[in-house]
Image: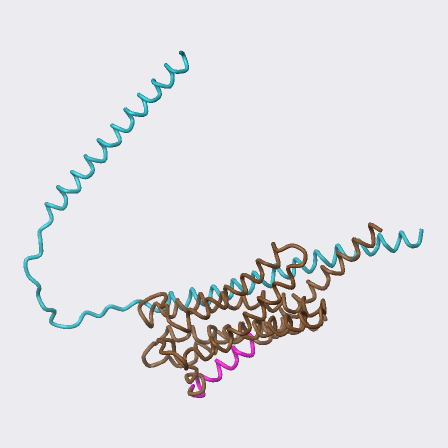
Protein backbone atom coordinates (compact mmCIF):
# COMPACT_ATOMS: atom_id res chain seq x y z
CA UNK A 1 0.00 0.00 0.00
CA UNK A 2 2.87 2.28 0.92
CA UNK A 3 4.54 1.35 -2.36
CA UNK A 4 1.41 2.20 -4.35
CA UNK A 5 1.12 5.51 -2.49
CA UNK A 6 4.72 6.45 -3.19
CA UNK A 7 4.31 5.46 -6.88
CA UNK A 8 1.23 7.65 -7.34
CA UNK A 9 3.08 10.49 -5.59
CA UNK A 10 6.04 10.23 -7.96
CA UNK A 11 3.63 10.11 -10.93
CA UNK A 12 2.01 13.32 -9.68
CA UNK A 13 5.44 14.95 -9.36
CA UNK A 14 6.35 13.83 -12.90
CA UNK A 15 3.01 15.10 -14.22
CA UNK A 16 3.52 18.50 -12.59
CA UNK A 17 7.03 18.71 -14.05
CA UNK A 18 5.79 17.93 -17.60
CA UNK A 19 3.06 20.61 -17.29
CA UNK A 20 5.75 23.11 -16.26
CA UNK A 21 7.92 22.08 -19.25
CA UNK A 22 4.95 22.43 -21.62
CA UNK A 23 4.26 25.90 -20.19
CA UNK A 24 7.89 26.98 -20.75
CA UNK A 25 7.74 25.65 -24.33
CA UNK A 26 4.49 27.50 -25.13
CA UNK A 27 5.90 30.72 -23.65
CA UNK A 28 9.07 30.33 -25.78
CA UNK A 29 7.00 29.74 -28.93
CA UNK A 30 4.88 32.82 -28.20
CA UNK A 31 8.02 34.89 -27.67
CA UNK A 32 9.44 33.64 -31.01
CA UNK A 33 6.18 34.49 -32.75
CA UNK A 34 6.26 38.02 -31.37
CA UNK A 35 9.90 38.40 -32.39
CA UNK A 36 9.11 37.20 -35.95
CA UNK A 37 6.11 39.52 -36.13
CA UNK A 38 8.37 42.44 -35.16
CA UNK A 39 10.57 41.86 -38.26
CA UNK A 40 9.58 43.85 -41.34
CA UNK A 41 8.77 41.76 -44.38
CA UNK A 42 10.66 42.39 -47.65
CA UNK A 43 8.33 44.25 -49.98
CA UNK A 44 10.48 44.44 -53.13
CA UNK A 45 13.59 42.91 -54.77
CA UNK A 46 16.21 45.46 -55.80
CA UNK A 47 18.73 44.40 -58.49
CA UNK A 48 22.38 44.79 -57.46
CA UNK A 49 24.45 47.36 -59.32
CA UNK A 50 27.35 44.86 -59.47
CA UNK A 51 27.61 41.12 -58.80
CA UNK A 52 28.59 40.58 -55.18
CA UNK A 53 31.86 38.69 -54.77
CA UNK A 54 31.28 35.64 -52.59
CA UNK A 55 34.64 34.10 -51.95
CA UNK A 56 35.53 31.30 -49.62
CA UNK A 57 39.09 31.84 -48.35
CA UNK A 58 41.32 29.04 -49.64
CA UNK A 59 44.17 29.45 -47.14
CA UNK A 60 42.41 27.71 -44.19
CA UNK A 61 41.46 24.78 -46.44
CA UNK A 62 45.03 24.39 -47.70
CA UNK A 63 46.38 24.73 -44.17
CA UNK A 64 43.99 22.09 -42.78
CA UNK A 65 44.81 19.71 -45.66
CA UNK A 66 48.59 19.93 -45.12
CA UNK A 67 48.23 19.82 -41.33
CA UNK A 68 46.12 16.67 -41.58
CA UNK A 69 48.69 14.97 -43.82
CA UNK A 70 51.55 15.83 -41.47
CA UNK A 71 49.69 14.83 -38.31
CA UNK A 72 48.41 11.54 -39.81
CA UNK A 73 51.85 10.53 -41.10
CA UNK A 74 53.77 11.52 -37.97
CA UNK A 75 51.21 9.79 -35.73
CA UNK A 76 51.39 6.60 -37.81
CA UNK A 77 55.20 6.55 -37.89
CA UNK A 78 55.33 7.18 -34.13
CA UNK A 79 52.77 4.44 -33.37
CA UNK A 80 54.55 1.97 -35.66
CA UNK A 81 57.91 2.73 -34.06
CA UNK A 82 56.49 2.21 -30.56
CA UNK A 83 54.88 -1.11 -31.53
CA UNK A 84 58.12 -2.29 -33.17
CA UNK A 85 60.14 -1.36 -30.09
CA UNK A 86 57.72 -3.15 -27.77
CA UNK A 87 57.63 -6.36 -29.84
CA UNK A 88 61.44 -6.38 -30.25
CA UNK A 89 61.87 -5.94 -26.49
CA UNK A 90 59.38 -8.72 -25.74
CA UNK A 91 61.08 -10.95 -28.29
CA UNK A 92 64.47 -10.43 -26.62
CA UNK A 93 63.01 -11.26 -23.19
CA UNK A 94 61.38 -14.50 -24.41
CA UNK A 95 64.54 -15.48 -26.33
CA UNK A 96 66.66 -14.89 -23.22
CA UNK A 97 64.31 -17.03 -21.12
CA UNK A 98 64.37 -19.83 -23.70
CA UNK A 99 68.18 -19.63 -23.91
CA UNK A 100 68.63 -19.79 -20.14
CA UNK A 101 66.22 -22.75 -19.95
CA UNK A 102 68.20 -24.57 -22.63
CA UNK A 103 71.45 -24.02 -20.73
CA UNK A 104 70.03 -25.26 -17.44
CA UNK B 1 66.40 -3.98 -42.58
CA UNK B 2 66.12 -1.56 -39.67
CA UNK B 3 69.00 0.49 -41.10
CA UNK B 4 67.34 0.61 -44.53
CA UNK B 5 64.05 1.74 -42.99
CA UNK B 6 65.86 4.45 -41.01
CA UNK B 7 67.67 5.69 -44.13
CA UNK B 8 64.43 5.75 -46.16
CA UNK B 9 62.60 7.53 -43.34
CA UNK B 10 65.41 10.09 -43.13
CA UNK B 11 65.23 10.76 -46.88
CA UNK B 12 61.43 11.04 -46.70
CA UNK B 13 61.66 13.43 -43.72
CA UNK B 14 64.09 15.71 -45.61
CA UNK B 15 61.91 15.64 -48.71
CA UNK B 16 58.73 16.35 -46.73
CA UNK B 17 60.49 19.23 -44.95
CA UNK B 18 61.51 20.72 -48.32
CA UNK B 19 58.15 20.16 -50.00
CA UNK B 20 56.30 23.21 -48.54
CA UNK B 21 58.99 25.56 -49.90
CA UNK B 22 58.74 24.09 -53.42
CA UNK B 23 54.93 24.07 -53.29
CA UNK B 24 54.92 27.67 -52.09
CA UNK B 25 57.24 28.69 -54.93
CA UNK B 26 55.07 26.97 -57.55
CA UNK B 27 52.69 29.30 -59.41
CA UNK B 28 49.00 29.36 -58.53
CA UNK B 29 46.58 27.74 -60.96
CA UNK B 30 44.60 30.24 -63.06
CA UNK B 31 41.04 29.13 -62.23
CA UNK B 32 41.40 27.50 -58.81
CA UNK B 33 44.05 29.72 -57.26
CA UNK B 34 45.65 28.82 -53.95
CA UNK B 35 43.45 25.80 -53.20
CA UNK B 36 44.99 23.92 -56.15
CA UNK B 37 48.13 23.52 -54.00
CA UNK B 38 46.36 20.70 -52.14
CA UNK B 39 46.96 18.70 -55.35
CA UNK B 40 50.71 18.37 -54.53
CA UNK B 41 49.94 16.06 -51.58
CA UNK B 42 46.54 14.75 -52.68
CA UNK B 43 47.67 13.07 -55.91
CA UNK B 44 50.91 11.47 -54.56
CA UNK B 45 48.85 10.14 -51.61
CA UNK B 46 46.40 8.64 -54.13
CA UNK B 47 49.32 7.07 -56.03
CA UNK B 48 50.71 5.34 -52.94
CA UNK B 49 47.17 4.29 -51.97
CA UNK B 50 47.03 2.46 -55.30
CA UNK B 51 50.49 1.02 -54.56
CA UNK B 52 49.30 -0.21 -51.15
CA UNK B 53 46.20 -1.76 -52.72
CA UNK B 54 48.33 -3.49 -55.37
CA UNK B 55 50.83 -4.76 -52.81
CA UNK B 56 47.97 -6.10 -50.68
CA UNK B 57 46.19 -7.68 -53.65
CA UNK B 58 49.26 -9.35 -55.17
CA UNK B 59 50.54 -10.56 -51.79
CA UNK B 60 47.05 -11.86 -50.94
CA UNK B 61 46.92 -13.76 -54.23
CA UNK B 62 50.35 -15.27 -53.51
CA UNK B 63 49.16 -16.21 -50.02
CA UNK B 64 45.99 -17.84 -51.39
CA UNK B 65 48.00 -19.75 -53.97
CA UNK B 66 51.13 -20.76 -52.06
CA UNK B 67 50.09 -20.15 -48.43
CA UNK B 68 53.32 -18.26 -47.73
CA UNK B 69 53.14 -16.54 -44.35
CA UNK B 70 55.48 -13.75 -45.49
CA UNK B 71 53.04 -12.89 -48.29
CA UNK B 72 50.30 -12.58 -45.69
CA UNK B 73 52.44 -10.17 -43.65
CA UNK B 74 53.16 -8.06 -46.73
CA UNK B 75 49.44 -8.05 -47.62
CA UNK B 76 48.51 -6.80 -44.17
CA UNK B 77 51.14 -4.05 -44.37
CA UNK B 78 49.90 -3.02 -47.83
CA UNK B 79 46.27 -2.89 -46.67
CA UNK B 80 47.13 -0.76 -43.66
CA UNK B 81 49.07 1.69 -45.82
CA UNK B 82 46.24 1.79 -48.37
CA UNK B 83 43.90 2.79 -45.53
CA UNK B 84 46.34 5.39 -44.15
CA UNK B 85 47.08 7.10 -47.47
CA UNK B 86 43.49 6.58 -48.63
CA UNK B 87 42.31 8.51 -45.58
CA UNK B 88 44.66 11.34 -46.59
CA UNK B 89 43.15 11.31 -50.10
CA UNK B 90 39.59 11.28 -48.76
CA UNK B 91 40.26 14.18 -46.39
CA UNK B 92 42.34 16.43 -48.65
CA UNK B 93 40.01 15.88 -51.65
CA UNK B 94 36.88 17.33 -50.02
CA UNK B 95 38.92 20.26 -48.66
CA UNK B 96 39.87 21.07 -52.25
CA UNK B 97 36.33 20.39 -53.52
CA UNK B 98 34.79 22.81 -51.00
CA UNK B 99 36.52 25.67 -52.78
CA UNK B 100 36.64 24.28 -56.33
CA UNK B 101 33.11 22.86 -56.55
CA UNK B 102 31.41 24.66 -53.66
CA UNK B 103 30.55 21.37 -51.94
CA UNK B 104 32.51 19.00 -49.72
CA UNK B 105 31.41 15.87 -51.52
CA UNK B 106 29.84 14.77 -54.80
CA UNK B 107 28.56 11.25 -55.39
CA UNK B 108 30.41 11.12 -58.66
CA UNK B 109 32.07 8.00 -60.04
CA UNK B 110 35.67 8.79 -59.03
CA UNK B 111 34.85 9.82 -55.47
CA UNK B 112 32.37 7.02 -54.86
CA UNK B 113 34.63 4.22 -56.15
CA UNK B 114 37.57 5.62 -54.19
CA UNK B 115 35.46 5.58 -51.01
CA UNK B 116 34.29 2.02 -51.75
CA UNK B 117 37.89 0.87 -52.34
CA UNK B 118 39.01 2.49 -49.09
CA UNK B 119 36.15 0.80 -47.22
CA UNK B 120 37.14 -2.58 -48.69
CA UNK B 121 40.60 -2.19 -47.15
CA UNK B 122 39.09 -1.00 -43.87
CA UNK B 123 36.97 -4.19 -43.98
CA UNK B 124 40.18 -6.17 -44.61
CA UNK B 125 41.79 -4.69 -41.48
CA UNK B 126 38.64 -5.24 -39.38
CA UNK B 127 38.55 -8.84 -40.56
CA UNK B 128 42.20 -9.32 -39.61
CA UNK B 129 41.70 -7.67 -36.23
CA UNK B 130 38.47 -9.34 -35.12
CA UNK B 131 38.08 -12.32 -37.47
CA UNK B 132 39.91 -14.78 -35.25
CA UNK B 133 42.07 -17.71 -36.37
CA UNK B 134 41.73 -18.57 -40.05
CA UNK B 135 40.40 -15.13 -41.01
CA UNK B 136 43.56 -14.44 -43.04
CA UNK B 137 42.24 -16.57 -45.93
CA UNK B 138 38.95 -14.67 -46.15
CA UNK B 139 40.85 -11.38 -45.69
CA UNK B 140 43.17 -12.34 -48.57
CA UNK B 141 40.13 -12.75 -50.84
CA UNK B 142 38.94 -9.29 -49.73
CA UNK B 143 42.43 -7.92 -50.48
CA UNK B 144 42.34 -9.29 -54.04
CA UNK B 145 38.87 -7.76 -54.49
CA UNK B 146 40.21 -4.40 -53.25
CA UNK B 147 43.06 -4.53 -55.75
CA UNK B 148 40.62 -5.20 -58.60
CA UNK B 149 38.95 -1.85 -57.81
CA UNK B 150 42.18 0.12 -58.45
CA UNK B 151 41.91 0.24 -62.28
CA UNK B 152 38.27 1.27 -61.95
CA UNK B 153 39.24 4.13 -59.65
CA UNK B 154 42.01 5.25 -62.01
CA UNK B 155 39.94 4.98 -65.19
CA UNK B 156 36.68 6.28 -63.68
CA UNK B 157 37.44 9.83 -64.86
CA UNK B 158 37.90 8.56 -68.42
CA UNK B 159 35.08 6.00 -68.49
CA UNK B 160 32.29 8.02 -66.89
CA UNK B 161 31.27 11.63 -66.89
CA UNK B 162 32.65 13.07 -63.65
CA UNK B 163 33.40 16.47 -62.17
CA UNK B 164 36.81 15.30 -60.94
CA UNK B 165 39.81 16.52 -62.97
CA UNK B 166 41.05 13.93 -65.46
CA UNK B 167 44.43 12.16 -65.38
CA UNK B 168 45.54 14.48 -68.21
CA UNK B 169 46.25 17.33 -65.79
CA UNK B 170 49.41 15.59 -64.57
CA UNK B 171 50.79 15.13 -68.09
CA UNK B 172 49.97 18.74 -68.97
CA UNK B 173 51.70 20.32 -65.94
CA UNK B 174 54.14 23.12 -66.83
CA UNK B 175 57.71 22.57 -65.53
CA UNK B 176 57.36 25.03 -62.62
CA UNK B 177 54.40 22.96 -61.35
CA UNK B 178 55.76 19.57 -62.43
CA UNK B 179 58.94 19.81 -60.33
CA UNK B 180 57.26 20.28 -56.95
CA UNK B 181 54.78 17.56 -57.93
CA UNK B 182 57.54 15.06 -58.81
CA UNK B 183 59.35 15.95 -55.58
CA UNK B 184 56.20 15.16 -53.56
CA UNK B 185 55.61 11.92 -55.48
CA UNK B 186 59.16 10.75 -54.67
CA UNK B 187 58.72 11.78 -51.01
CA UNK B 188 55.50 9.79 -50.72
CA UNK B 189 56.96 6.75 -52.53
CA UNK B 190 60.08 6.71 -50.30
CA UNK B 191 57.91 7.04 -47.19
CA UNK B 192 55.61 4.30 -48.45
CA UNK B 193 58.60 1.99 -49.01
CA UNK B 194 59.94 2.66 -45.51
CA UNK B 195 56.55 2.11 -43.88
CA UNK B 196 55.88 -1.05 -45.89
CA UNK B 197 59.20 -2.55 -44.77
CA UNK B 198 58.68 -1.52 -41.14
CA UNK B 199 55.06 -2.76 -41.00
CA UNK B 200 55.98 -6.10 -42.61
CA UNK B 201 58.81 -6.48 -40.12
CA UNK B 202 56.41 -5.79 -37.24
CA UNK B 203 54.05 -8.51 -38.46
CA UNK B 204 56.92 -11.00 -38.93
CA UNK B 205 58.21 -10.22 -35.42
CA UNK B 206 54.72 -10.73 -33.96
CA UNK B 207 54.49 -14.15 -35.64
CA UNK B 208 57.97 -15.05 -34.37
CA UNK B 209 56.98 -13.91 -30.88
CA UNK B 210 53.88 -16.15 -30.96
CA UNK B 211 56.10 -19.10 -31.96
CA UNK B 212 58.56 -18.25 -29.18
CA UNK B 213 55.74 -18.16 -26.59
CA UNK B 214 54.51 -21.55 -27.80
CA UNK B 215 58.07 -22.95 -27.57
CA UNK B 216 58.31 -21.58 -24.03
CA UNK B 217 55.07 -23.32 -23.02
CA UNK B 218 56.22 -26.73 -24.42
The one nearer the camera, B100 or B204, is: B204
Name the dominant secondary structure of the magenta segment. Answer: helix
Colour mapping used in the image = by chain
Please identify the quarter of the rendering in which residue B56 is found.
Answer: bottom right
User: Which residue shows up at 33% across the image and 81% down it?
Assistant: B30
Residue B164 in the image, given as x and y percentages of width and height:
38, 76
Tell me the shade of chain B: brown
The one nearer the camera, A97 or B12, is: A97
Image quadrant holding the N terminus of chain B, namely bottom right
A32 relative to B164, above or below: above
Residue B19 in the image, given as x and y percentages of width and height:
50, 75
Q: Residue furthest right?
A: A104
The one nearer the camera, B25 or A10, is: A10
- Colour-to-chain, cyan: A
Residue B154 in the image, given as x and y percentages of width and height:
47, 78
User: Which residue shows up at 64% across the image and 74% down it?
Assistant: B8
B175 relative to B47, above or below: below
Residue A60 in the image, given as x and y percentages of width and height:
38, 65
A26 relative to B76, above or below: above
Q: Is residue B27 magenta?
A: no
Please identify the quarter of the rendering in which residue B167 is found.
Answer: bottom left
Please identify the quarter of the rendering in which residue B67 is found.
Answer: bottom right
| A9 relative to B139 in the view: left or right | left
Q: Is residue B2 visible?
A: no
Q: How many marks?
A: 0
Q: Which residues are magenta?
A: B173-188
User: Which residue shows up at 46% across the image and 73% down it?
Assistant: B42
Q: Is residue B134 visible?
A: yes
Amino acid sequence: MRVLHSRSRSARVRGGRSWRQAGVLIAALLACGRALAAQTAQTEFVPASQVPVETLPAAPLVFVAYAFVWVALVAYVFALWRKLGRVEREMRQVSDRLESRRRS
Amino acid sequence: MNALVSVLLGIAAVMFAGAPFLIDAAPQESTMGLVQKIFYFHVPAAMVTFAGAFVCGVASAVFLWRRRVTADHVALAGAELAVLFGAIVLVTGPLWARKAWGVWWQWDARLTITLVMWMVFVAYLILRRFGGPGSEVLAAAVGVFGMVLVPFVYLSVELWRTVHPTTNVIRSLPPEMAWPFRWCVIAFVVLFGALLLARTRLESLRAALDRAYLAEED
